[in-house]
Image: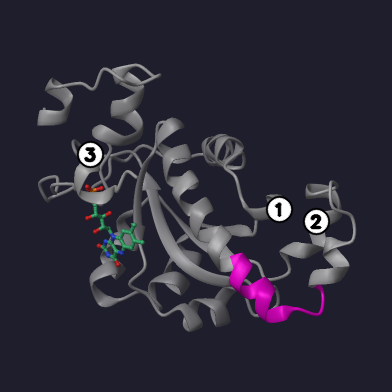
């Protein structure tokens, strides 16, 4: 049991069990049990993560679920050497990507501002930057959503993004930026002890 678990914070709106599940006891996982991960569990995680805010409700994150041995081999070929065995060992790996064509959905997703879709159509550079910024934010929601669905997550970005994009996203134009291995943690799920974190006083300036 870690120090944080024995000294629970009292100023939270959720119970210690939830705080532990989502943050304090959850580790970046690379050691898995044999328990499978269903598409229903992944969908349950998404059904929470999708509510996390994005600019103009753009939701530019796209997810490729890499499950089969054949698909895993295609992904592993583009991972950094240290990450190859981690992808191979995980029950499922998610490739997170940003969709620069996110604006196609804006009439539905952001009806408060009609015309945004047409305004963004010619602005490819703006769309690419917006897609990346907001998809990165969504990646954090996905990690917490996976934990809320009872799953463990192992994010990693040591990979050849152009290689992954050519392998999987040549026709869609999605831009990969992260792989998240997903499964059930074997024990703590990590061979490393939990690293220390910066305190509020170290990261925040209150004016
Ligand atoms: C954006 C991102 C990229 C990462 N890239 C890698 C990676 O390429 N390989 C790896 O083994 N771990 C990678 N990690 C894992 C981090 O080292 C790990 O999340 C961090 O040390 C915290 O570990 P903890 O959650 O167990 O406390 C990455 C994590 C994040 C969020």
In-image side of 103 versus 195 (left or right): right
Q: Mark 1 points at which residue?
A: 56
Q: Which residue is drawn at 44% across and 49% down?
A: 140
Q: Is residue 103 above or below residue 92?
A: below
Corner quadrant of residue 181: bottom left
Q: Which of 66 and 60 is in front in this view?
A: 60
Marks 1/2: CA–CA distance: 8 Å
- SS state under label 3: loop
- Determine whether 99 is above or below 77 in the image: above
Mark 1 surroundings within 10 Å by alpha-carbon count, few (fewer than 14), some (14 through 19), many (20 or more): some
- Coloration of the structure image: one colour
Task: Report x, y in % for residue 7.
Answer: 14, 22
Determine the image quadrant of residue 23.
top left
| Location of the C terminus (image quadrant) | top left
Q: Which quadrant does ligand 1 occupy?
A: bottom left
Horizontally, is 107 left or right of 24 in the view? right
Q: To which residue does mark 3 refer?
A: 186
Badge 2 element = helix
State yes or no: discs 1 and 2 in contact (Cβ < 8 Å): yes
Q: How many marks?
A: 3
Residue drawn where x is 40% and y is 19% of the image:
13
Q: Which residue in the structure is indicated by mark 2? A: 106
Start-end of magenta stretch: 121-131
Q: Are marks 1 and 3 in contact (CB under 8 Å)?
A: no
- Residue plotted at (62% across, 66% down): 131
The x, y position of residue 206, in whole percent, is 32, 43
**Element carrying mark 1:** helix
Quick check: 136 left or right of 119?
Answer: left
């Amino acid at each position: 049991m870690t120090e944080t678990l024995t000294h629970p914070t009292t100023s939270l709106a959720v119970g210690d069990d939830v705080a532990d599940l989502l943050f304090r006891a959850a580790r970046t996982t690379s050691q898995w049990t044999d328990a499978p991960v269903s598409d229903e569990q992944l969908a349950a995680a998404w059904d929470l993560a999708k509510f996390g805010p994005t600019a103009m409700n753009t939701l530019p994150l796209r997810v490729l679920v890499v499950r089969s041995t054949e698909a895993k081999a295609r992904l592993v070929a583009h991972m950094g050497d240290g990450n190859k065995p981690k992808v191979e060992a995980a029950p499922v790996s998610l490739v997170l990507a940003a969709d620069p064509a996110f604006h196609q959905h804006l009439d539905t997703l952001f009806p408060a501002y009609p015309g945004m879709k047409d305004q963004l159509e010619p602005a490819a550079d703006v769309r690419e930057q917006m897609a990346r910024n907001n998809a990165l934010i969504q990646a954090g929601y996905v990690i917490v959503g996976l934990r809320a669905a009872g799953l463990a997550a192992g994010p990693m970005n040591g990979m050849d993004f152009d290689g992954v994009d050519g392998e999987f996203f040549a026709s869609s134009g999605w831009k990969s930026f992260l792989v998240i291995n997903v499964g059930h943690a074997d024990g703590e799920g990590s061979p490393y002890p939990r690293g220390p974190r910066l305190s509020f006083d170290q990261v925040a300036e209150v004016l």
